[in-house]
């Protein structure tokens, strides 16, 4: 009865997609529990690249059933685009992909508002992916959202869309000075999807519960990362969901005691896309070198990722909040050519030592990193398949991180390909 949850321990893009792929061999079910098509999870299989946004990574394993859980905000347009991509790559989804009847639906007006709100923020842009995530979760928590199940009650759907558009259109006209959206057009578009969605819709929380109770193996695939968590991340520069382990419970309906392994995915350095504080960021030559070496460009938006060193303060915050039982350290190979590696051990703010990730946006953005310098290994690791194959100094780096964060590093990723992984 094994449920594993795979969670980003930093600001997203840690390599969750790759780890889900590696660990989903022979796994019965893979489920997404939060976020939506803002995610970009990359998997390389024999040099072929797959980027998944909404559909769980388990879809690349032919015997695995995939679930889009109730906590996800579901964009039908993005979903059918992704289905086409999978079909073009001869991946069948027939009978093995299901969407929760309780998941909330993203409509084009959510994406429009997301983009217009961002434009209006001037210098304080969050840098969202523009996928309508925030506005869709606003409707959910405002209790005006439209769930998958509501699509099948035509009268209710019409009423809800008309009600929601009253507010959206008021904002479009009065705040953003834009033309309004017509309910007829929205209804016509969504009506084109409803029948196609029917075979995918399920009471997924019951399905997951029954599967867990029957002893099936389940992976819950987190999107984004702990530092983008709406409660515990670098608020307001966060996403609008809970990527942390609590979100895996509310976003699937599985009970807390079902979680057996809570796996944090953490890069050997740090990246972030979008706005907000990043204490160990390197904005100069070193940042550029990390970006180039790690090909750090967003899988969803193509934006260059901001790069910096490993941050122990942030990592300990993530460990405490998620209860990680083990870690996967990714992109170790990206550091292969560096002469020295830095690790941010604490922050300092006006002489004060800060070892707990601050809640205050202002304090976090004023924190200065204090570094420990580590001698690097300067030799390739991408061919290593056992811990013993790694250069001595790479092993020392891993052991140092493990001792500092106090969670066993069980997986080490040394390249983008499925096979470039060390099980420890
Ligand atoms: P996710 O959102 O957490 O799934 O991560 P992304 O897919 O957005 O970004 C991770 C990127 O790093 C992708 O391009 C992966 O193919 C790549 N990647 C994953 N693990 C490794 C690794 O160990 N080494 C290298 N060099 N690339 C990796
Ligand atoms: P994966 O799953 C990295 C960031 C955006 C922005 C903030 C809010 O691939 O790790 P949103 O569109 O969610 O309202 O944007 O969150 N963001 C991500 N950054 N990886 C992601 O997903 C992200 N999803 C959202 O850049 O700063
Ligand atoms: Mg990503």
Image (cartoon, rainbow, N blue to C red):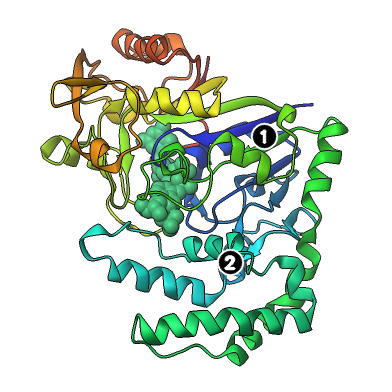
Residue found 74% across the figure and 29% down from its top: 258
Where residue 185 sits in the image (x, y, percent)?
A: 59, 90
Against 38, residue 306 (above or below) is above
Q: Is mark 2 within 8 Å of ligand 2?
A: no
Q: Give the number of the mark in front: 2 or 1.
A: 2
Secondary structure of residue under mark 2 = loop
How many other residues sit within 10 Å of disc 1, few (<14), some (14-19) or many (≥20)? Answer: some
**In this orientation, which residue lies closer to the viewer: 83 or 89?**
83
Q: Residue at x 23, y 16 (%)?
A: 376
**Is residue 294 visible in the rendered structure shown here?**
yes
- Mark 2 / mark 1, whichever is N-terminal: 1
Q: Which quarter of the image is occupied by the N terminus? A: top right
Label 2 and label 1: CA atoms lie apart by 27 Å
Instruction: Identify residue for label 2.
Output: 75
Residue 359 falls left or right of residue 258 = left
For label 1, the SS is loop
The residue pinned by badge 1 equals 25
User: Could you tell me if residue 420 is visible in this image?
Assistant: no
Residue pictured at 66% horizontal, 49% vertical = 59
The numbered disc on residue 117 is: none
Would residue 377 be found to the left or right of residue 176 on screen?
A: left
Q: Position of residue 71 (x, y in %)?
A: 64, 51
Work out whether 39 lies above or below 326.
Answer: below
Q: Is residue 140 above or below residue 45?
A: below
Nearer to me, 58 or 384: 58
* Image location (x, y in percent) of residue 306: 25, 44
* Residue 423 quadrant: top right
Residue for point 55% across, 91% down: 182
Residue 368 percent across, percent down from the top left? 17, 29
Count of marks overlaid on the render: 2
Answer left or right for 346 relative to 284: right
């Amino acid at each position: 009865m094994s449920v594993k949850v795979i969670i980003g321990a930093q600001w997203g893009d840690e390599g969750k997609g790759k780890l889900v792929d590696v660990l989903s061999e022979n796994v019965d079910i893979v489920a997404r529990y939060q976020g939506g098509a803002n995610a970009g999870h990359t998997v390389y299989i024999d040099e072929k690249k797959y980027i998944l946004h909404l559909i769980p990574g388990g879809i690349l394993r032919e015997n695995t059933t995939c679930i889009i859980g109730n906590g996800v905000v579901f964009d039908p347009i993005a979903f059918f685009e992704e289905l086409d991509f999978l079909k073009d790559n001869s991946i069948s989804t027939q009978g093995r992909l299901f969407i929760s009847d309780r998941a909330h639906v993203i409509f084009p007006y959510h994406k429009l508002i997301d983009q217009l709100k961002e434009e209006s923020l001037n210098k304080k842009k969050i840098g969202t992916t523009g996928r309508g995530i925030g506005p869709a979760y606003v409707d959910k928590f405002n209790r005006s959202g439209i769930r998958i199940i509501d699509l099948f009650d035509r009268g209710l759907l019409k009423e809800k869309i008309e009600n929601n558009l009253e507010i959206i259109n008021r904002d479009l006209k009065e705040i953003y000075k834009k033309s309004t959206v017509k309910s007829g057009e929205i209804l016509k578009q969504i009506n084109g999807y409803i029948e196609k969605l029917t075979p995918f819709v399920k009471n997924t929380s019951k399905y997951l519960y029954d599967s867990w109770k029957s002893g099936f193996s389940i992976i819950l695939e987190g999107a984004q990362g702990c530092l983008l968590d709406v409660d515990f991340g670098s608020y307001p520069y966060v996403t609008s969901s809970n990527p942390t382990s609590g979100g895996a419970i509310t976003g699937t309906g599985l009970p807390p005691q079902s979680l057996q392994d809570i796996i944090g995915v953490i890069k050997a350095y740090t990246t972030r896309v979008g706005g907000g504080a990043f204490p160990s960021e390197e904005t100069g030559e070193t940042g550029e070198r990390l970006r180039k070496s790690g090909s750090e460009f967003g899988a969803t938006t193509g934006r260059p990722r901001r790069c910096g060193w490993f941050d122990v303060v942030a990592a300990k915050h993530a460990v405490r909040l998620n209860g990680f039982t083990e870690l996967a350290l990714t992109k170790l190979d990206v550091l292969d050519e560096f002469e020295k590696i830095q690790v941010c051990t604490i922050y300092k703010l006006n002489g004060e030592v800060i070892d707990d990730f601050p809640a205050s946006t202002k304090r976090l953005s004023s924190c200065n990193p204090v570094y420990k310098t580590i001698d690097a290994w300067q030799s390739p690791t991408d061919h290593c398949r056992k811990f013993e194959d790694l250069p001595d100094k790479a092993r020392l780096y891993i052991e140092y991180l493990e001792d500092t964060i106090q969670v066993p590093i069980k997986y080490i990723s040394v390249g983008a390909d499925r096979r470039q992984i060390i099980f420890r």
